[in-house]
């Protein structure tokens, strides 16, 4: 009687043994597959990382070269622009300084002229005041001398008349 189940324990034991065997085979298959997959993934990852690293380095080198060129071009352009701006500003500054110097000289000439004029007026005023003082002193002295002369003349005439009347 093949295929016939003699008792439930034997069936259970057989079923348990089959399940254990299936479980072991499945686990071994999964582990073996995982190991193989892991090896394949590691090889692929290493190869991909190596390729990526090389491509990244090529990109960095190319990018660095391009960035360096861009930076150099930018610096050159900036320096040329700065030189143009400096020349323009220098020209403006020179013109402004020239205009300021001209204005300063003109203002100084006007002020000097005013100062000279004020000085000449002050000198003329002093001369006029001195002349006026001399003239006033001269007139005062002349009037005093006239008064003295008149007094002397009156005195002399009066004395002479008195002397004449006493004699």
Image: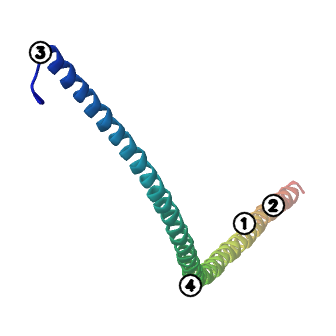
State which mark lies toward you, 2 or 3. 3
Tell me the distance, in whole angstroms, between the alpha carbons under discs 2 and 3. Answer: 187 Å
State which mark lies toward you, 2 or 4. 4
Mark 1: secondary structure: helix
Whether residue 21 is situated above or below residue 86 in the rendered picture = above
Lower position in the chain sequence, tag 2 or tag 3: 3
Q: Which residue occupies 83% across, 61% down?
A: 152
Residue at the spot of label 2: 148
Q: Quadrant of the C terminus?
A: bottom right
Q: Which mark is residue 7?
A: 3
Q: Which residue occupies 11% across, 18% down?
A: 6
State which mark lies toward you, 3 or 4. 3
Lower position in the chain sequence, tag 2 or tag 4: 4
Residue at the spot of label 4: 84
Say whether marks 1 and 2 touch (CB < 8 Å).
Answer: no
Residue 36 falls left or right of residue 102:
left
Residue at the spot of label 1: 136
Say whether marks 2 and 4 touch (CB < 8 Å).
Answer: no
Q: Quadrant of the N terminus?
A: top left
Q: Give percent across and percent down for residue 67.
A: 53, 73
* Classed neighbour count for the residue bearing mark 4: other residues with Cα under 10 Å, few (<14), some (14–19), many (≥20): few
Front residue of 76/127: it is 76
Tell me the distance, in whole angstroms, between the alpha carbons under discs 2 and 4. Answer: 93 Å
State the image quarter where residue 117 is shown.
bottom right
Q: Which residue occupies 85% across, 57% down?
A: 159
């Amino acid at each position: 009687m093949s295929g016939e189940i003699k008792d439930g324990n034997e069936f259970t034991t057989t079923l348990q043994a089959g399940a254990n065997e299936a479980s072991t085979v499945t686990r071994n298959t999964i582990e073996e597959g995982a190991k193989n997959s892991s090896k394949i993934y590691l090889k692929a990852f290493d190869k991909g990382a190596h390729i990526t690293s090389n491509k990244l380095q090529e990109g960095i080198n190319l990018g660095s070269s391009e960035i360096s060129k861009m930076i150099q071009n930018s610096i050159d352009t900036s320096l040329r622009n700065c030189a143009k701006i400096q020349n323009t500003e220098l020209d403006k500054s020179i013109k402004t300084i020239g205009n300021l110097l001209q204005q300063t000289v003109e203002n100084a000439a006007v002020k000097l002229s005013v100062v000279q004029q004020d000085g000449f007026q002050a000198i003329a005023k002093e001369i006029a005041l001195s002349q006026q003082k001399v003239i006033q002193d001269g007139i005062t002295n002349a009037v005093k001398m006239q008064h003295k002369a008149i007094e002397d003349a009156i005195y002399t005439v009066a004395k002479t008349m008195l002397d004449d009347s006493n004699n």
